[in-house]
Image (cartoon, grey):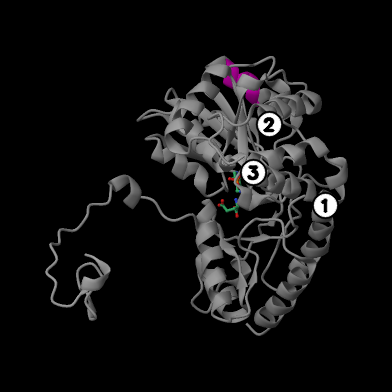
């Protein structure tokens, strides 16, 4: 219909809930949404963050500890390199697995830090670590396969396994044990259908880690059984208390068909919105990911990759102060959290989340983590994510990647709410 013919009066269709011209006849047959999509729930971390944003936009004074993102600006070198690339017209499609310089720089970074001998064609740059993990599930799993996933788990891991037609097999880690990830428990869950173990250390949301000896046992056992160890090391740089970082990359040379490492620019360099992550692994697998990527996103954003390369080349020395700030925030926030009635929280070994037990906040109609999160939101205007989203009841997740003033404000608000309860 051309502009001149547009009617002046529109009504809302009862079937489609869209505006339609008054008097128009619409042909309506409900569109079928796939069972696959219907079985999914929106990422809980993103949906709580969305609700918090909506409330803020409506003028409600919310302190948001829901989504996990550093409150720092991205590194200046990244911003200026990306801006310059954009201005110079680096705005076309690039090689589908990412720009060669960035792939080479990642291979060399892992070689230097972990002694792994991955070459450029064993690295793919992806639209966030999320897409690397998604593509890995698509490349590795078939209908009926299983993948072992420790819980609490990051919300997207089991859903990505399911979207690939496989079944996540959940192995619980325990708060009493600092949510440590142990090889024995994961291996006990392996069956003849298992294709992979999805290790996320340090873990979002618990902060739990696997130690070097356990990791070695796990890698060797995976190699013996023909399993892939997918190591999601998004929080590799966020390790506290002088504890050494352990990366599965250190085993890649000895076990080239077993180890796959996923990393992200999001947290390390405060570049969440740039959407850049990567995977390193055997060349055949990386080629399969590149094929999937060629049909899914093509390449990651051209000029964003130039920015990420600048951040990586600058090295970590400039950035170390920022990373240290997370430990300071942990040490600042955790003692306060434990002073709140009904809340109990061990200091996380890594990542940047507190995952307190909140069963002490049950009562008065509240009997699960969702009810507690809602109570915090309504009663204190503090946004947190219920533990059930991570497959773990009785806890909520609070990101301490937020500004110190926000953490202080959360303490004051919860103090009022919980003391009055
Ligand atoms: N893995 C874990 C454990 C995460 O918490 C996240 C969310 N940041 C991702 C992967 C994905 O990160 P991104 O897509 O932002 O690189
Ligand atoms: N990974 C972050 C979180 O857990 C960002 C949101 C998401 O991608 O799920 O909050």
Per the rendered image, the range of residues in magenta is 218-223
Q: Which mark identifies residue 304?
A: 3
Report whether 11 appears left or right of 202.
left
* Distance of label 1 from label 2 (alpha carbons): 23 Å
Report whether 197 appears left or right of 79.
left
Count residues near mark 2 (Cα–Cα under 10 Å), then give few for <14, some for 14-19, many for 20+. many
Residue 365, can we see it? yes
Q: Which mark identifies residue 102?
A: 2
- The percent position of residue 63, horizontal first and vertical second, equals 66, 72
Residue 283 found in image quarter: top right
Count residues near mark 1 (Cα–Cα under 10 Å), then give few for <14, some for 14-19, many for 20+. some
| Quadrant in which the C terminus is drawn | bottom right
Q: Secondary structure at mark 1?
A: helix
Lower sequence index among marks 1 and 2: 2
Q: Secondary structure at mark 2?
A: helix
Residue nearest the viewer, comparing 315 with 348: 315
Q: Which mark identifies residue 322?
A: 1
Residue nearest the viewer, comparing 190 with 243: 243
Q: Secondary structure at mark 3?
A: helix
**Residue found 55% across the figure and 42% down from its top:** 130
Q: Which mark identifies residue 185?
A: none
Reply above or below: 204 against 227.
below
Q: Are marks 1 and 3 in contact (CB under 8 Å)?
A: no
Lower sequence index among marks 2 and 3: 2
Reply above or below: 284 against 189.
above
- The percent position of residue 136, horizontal first and vertical second, equals 50, 31
Which mark is in front, 1 or 3?
A: 3
Which mark is in front, 1 or 2?
A: 2
* Distance of label 2 from label 3 (alpha carbons): 11 Å
Residue 147, can we see it? no
């Amino acid at each position: 219909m051309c502009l001149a013919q547009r009617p002046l009066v529109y009504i809302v269709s009862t079937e489609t809930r869209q505006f339609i011209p008054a008097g128009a006849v619409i042909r309506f047959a409900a569109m079928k949404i796939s069972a696959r999509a219907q079985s999914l729930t929106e990422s809980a971390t993103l949906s709580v963050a969305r609700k918090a944003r909506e409330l803020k936009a409506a003028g409600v004074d919310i302190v948001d500890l829901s989504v996990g993102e550093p409150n720092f600006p991205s590194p200046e070198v990244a911003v200026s390199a990306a801006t310059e690339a954009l201005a110079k017209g680096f705005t076309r499609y690039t090689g589908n697995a990412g720009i060669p310089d960035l792939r080479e720089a990642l291979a060399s970074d892992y070689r230097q830090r972990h002694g792994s001998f991955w070459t450029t064609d064993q690295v793919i740059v992806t639209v966030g670590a999320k897409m690397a993990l998604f593509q890995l599930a698509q490349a590795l799993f078939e209908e009926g396969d299983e993948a072992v996933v420790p819980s609490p788990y990051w919300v997207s891991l089991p859903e990505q396994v399911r979207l690939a037609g496989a079944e996540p097999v959940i192995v619980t880690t325990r708060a009493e044990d600092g949510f440590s990830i142990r090889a024995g428990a994961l291996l006990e869950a392996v069956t003849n259908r298992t294709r992979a173990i999805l290790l996320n250390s340090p873990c979002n949301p618990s902060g739990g880690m696997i130690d070097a000896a356990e990791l070695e046992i796990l890698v060797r056992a995976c190699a013996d059984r023909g399993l892939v160890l997918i190591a999601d090391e998004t929080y590799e740089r966020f390790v506290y208390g002088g504890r050494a970082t352990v990366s599965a990359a250190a085993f890649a040379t000895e076990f080239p068909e077993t180890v796959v490492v996923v990393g992200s620019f999001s947290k390390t360099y405060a570049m969440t919105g740039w959407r850049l992550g990567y995977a390193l692994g055997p060349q055949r697998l990386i080629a399969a990911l590149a094929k999937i990527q060629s049909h899914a996103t093509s390449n990651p954003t051209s000029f964003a990759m130039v920015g990420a390369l600048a951040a990586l080349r600058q090295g970590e020395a400039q950035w170390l102060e920022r990373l240290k700030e997370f430990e300071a925030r942990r040490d600042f926030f955790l003692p306060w959290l434990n002073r709140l009635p009904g809340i109990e929280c061990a200091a996380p070994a890594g990542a940047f989340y507190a995952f307190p037990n909140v069963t002490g906040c049950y009562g008065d109609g509240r009997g699960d983590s969702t009810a507690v999160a809602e109570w915090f939101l309504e009663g204190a205007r503090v946004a947190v994510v219920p533990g059930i989203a991570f497959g773990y009841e009785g806890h909520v997740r609070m990101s301490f990647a937020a500004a110190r003033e926000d953490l202080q404000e959360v303490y004051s608000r919860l103090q009022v709410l919980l003391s009055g309860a």
